[in-house]
Image (spheres, helix red, strand yellow):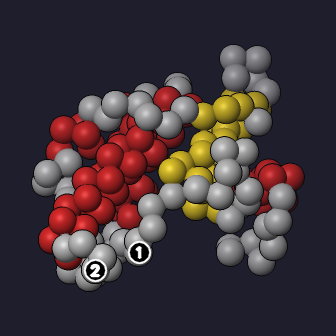
Amino acid sequence: LLTGQKIGTQQDVVRVMDMLHSLGPNTVVITSSELPASRGPDYLVTLGSQRRVGEDGQTHSLRICLEIPRVDAVFVGTGDLFAAMLLAWTHHHPSNFKLACEKTVSAMHHVLQRTINSARALAGPGVRPSYAQLELRMVQSKKDIENPELVVTSTLL
């Protein structure tokens, strides 16, 4: 991690996000953490923080938590896809970080579900899909990337 800090609790994540904010970025998202999800072990936890200067001139932080269904596979390119979509959705919704993250994570969910379903069909029953079969189905997911149905909602920290 960029801060050299270990993350074991949600409070650790908030502390690390504040450290990263102090280095300059106004938006920080920590994806796929191993923190326990309230919905159980079949979910990954993603936490985000955005700092903005309000009309009062004070800096305010919005912190959110999202729990994402875990997919039992290793994909290549998910970090790049996440970063690109987060950039696009925060640009599209500059004053709604919560919605931008929900759209990003929901689109990721749709892409990964389409990819794993296709890969399993190609691999056949009882066979673990290969890396080639797990190539992200980006073209097939175009509509979900452009206008994702929200299947993941965030909670405020």
What is the quadrant of the N terminus in the image? Answer: bottom right
Pointer 1 local density, CA inside 10 Å: few below 14, some 14–19, many at least 20: few
At 76% from the left edge and 17% from the top edge, which residue is drawn? 56
Give the residue number, with chain letter if any, for mark 1.
74
Vertical placement of residue 11 versus 50, above or below? below
Q: Amino acid at mark 1?
A: Val
| Most foreground residue, 23 or 131 | 131
Whether 92 is drawn above or below 41: the answer is above
Taking the view exactly as shown, the residue that stands out farthest to the top is 55
Query: Who comes first in sequence, dot 2 or dot 1?
Result: 1
The x and y percentages for residue 129 are 27, 77
Residue 33 in view in this figure? yes
- Res 50 → quadrant: top right
| Residue 41: percent from left, percent from top | 65, 58
Label 2 element class: loop
Gap in Å between the C-alphas at discs 2 and 1?
15 Å
**For the residues carrying marks 2 and 1, which lies nearer the camera in this image?**
2
Number of marks in the image?
2
Instruction: Examine the rendering and report whether any part of residue 133 can be seen.
Output: no
Q: Which residue is mark 2?
A: 127
